[in-house]
Image (cartoon, rainbow, N blue to C red):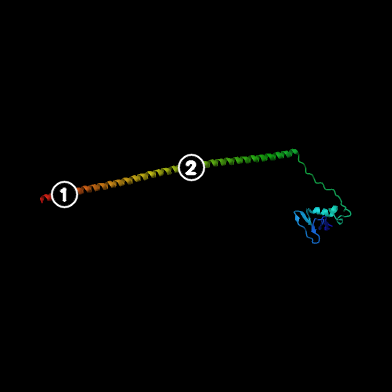
């Protein structure tokens, strides 16, 4: 029977059945496994075994033999019937097959040529668009340069205008100072004439006295 348990040589504390299941005698405790191997320990001896190795150790040469109850006394009679032949497909002539293959290859080649032409046209359109964009970029650069030049010219004009305004302000100030100086000079001359007249009049009065 496949559920028959036998003790394992060198490890009497363990038993195994034909299915490779290991347990401890008495308690039914199953030992730990290291991957697919069982790790057995009995006193000072320890080792790891595959399940089929333990089955071979316990059951010997008849480990792989099926139980007697599973083997029938006589094989059942069976009738062998001839198989029904399958119809073989007709093999096409080699010439027609090659012609069809050549036609398919020509169609594939023509499709590849058409796709290549389409890609060429797309590439040419992309080149034209790139050149147009490049021209637009150059035009924008030229416009920016002109604007920059105009800004510099206006800045120079502004500087010149400011300088001229400063000169006008300076000349106006000088003129005002000159006018004021002339007025003061006229006033000084008038006062001097008055002093001279006063001195002459006093001299006349002094002679009269």
114 shown above or below 208: above
Q: Percent from the top left, x then y, of residue 107? A: 67, 40
* Residue pictured at 18% horizontal, 49% vertical: 195
Q: Is label 2 in a helix, a strand or a loop?
A: helix
In the displayed image of the protein, which residue is found farthest to the left?
A: 208
The quadrant in which residue 106 appears is: top right
* Residue pictured at 58% horizontal, 41% vertical: 123
Q: Percent from the top left, x then y, of residue 48? A: 77, 53
**Which residue is under mark 2?**
141
The quadrant in which residue 21 appears is: bottom right
**From the image, which quarter does the N terminus lie in?**
bottom right
* Residue pictured at 35% horizontal, 46% vertical: 166
**Which residue is under mark 1?**
199
Q: Is label 1 in a helix, a strand or a loop?
A: helix
How far apart are the two marked residues, 2 and 1, measured between alpha carbons?
Answer: 87 Å
| The one of 188 and 160 positioned closer to us in this rendering | 188
């Amino acid at each position: 029977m496949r559920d028959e348990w036998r003790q394992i040589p060198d490890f009497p504390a363990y038993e195994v059945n034909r299915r490779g299941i290991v347990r401890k005698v008495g308690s039914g405790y199953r030992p730990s496994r290291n991957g697919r191997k069982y790790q057995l320990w009995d006193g000072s001896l320890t080792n790891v075994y595959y399940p089929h190795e333990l089955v071979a150790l316990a059951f010997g040469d008849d480990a792989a033999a099926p139980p007697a109850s599973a083997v029938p006394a006589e094989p059942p009679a069976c009738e062998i019937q001839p198989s029904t032949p399958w119809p073989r497909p007709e093999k096409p002539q080699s010439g027609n097959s090659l012609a069809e293959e050549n036609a398919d290859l020509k169609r594939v080649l023509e499709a590849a040529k058409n796709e290549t032409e389409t890609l060429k046209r797309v590439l040419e359109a992309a080149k034209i668009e790139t050149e147009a964009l490049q021209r637009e970029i150059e035009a924008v650069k030229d416009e920016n340069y002109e604007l920059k030049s105009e800004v510099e010219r206006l800045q120079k004009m502004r500087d010149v205008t400011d300088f001229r305004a400063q000169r006008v302000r300076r000349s106006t100030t000088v003129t005002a100072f000159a006018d004021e100086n002339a007025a003061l000079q006229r006033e000084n001359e008038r006062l001097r004439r008055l002093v001279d007249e006063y001195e002459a009049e006093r001299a006349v009065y002094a002679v009269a006295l």
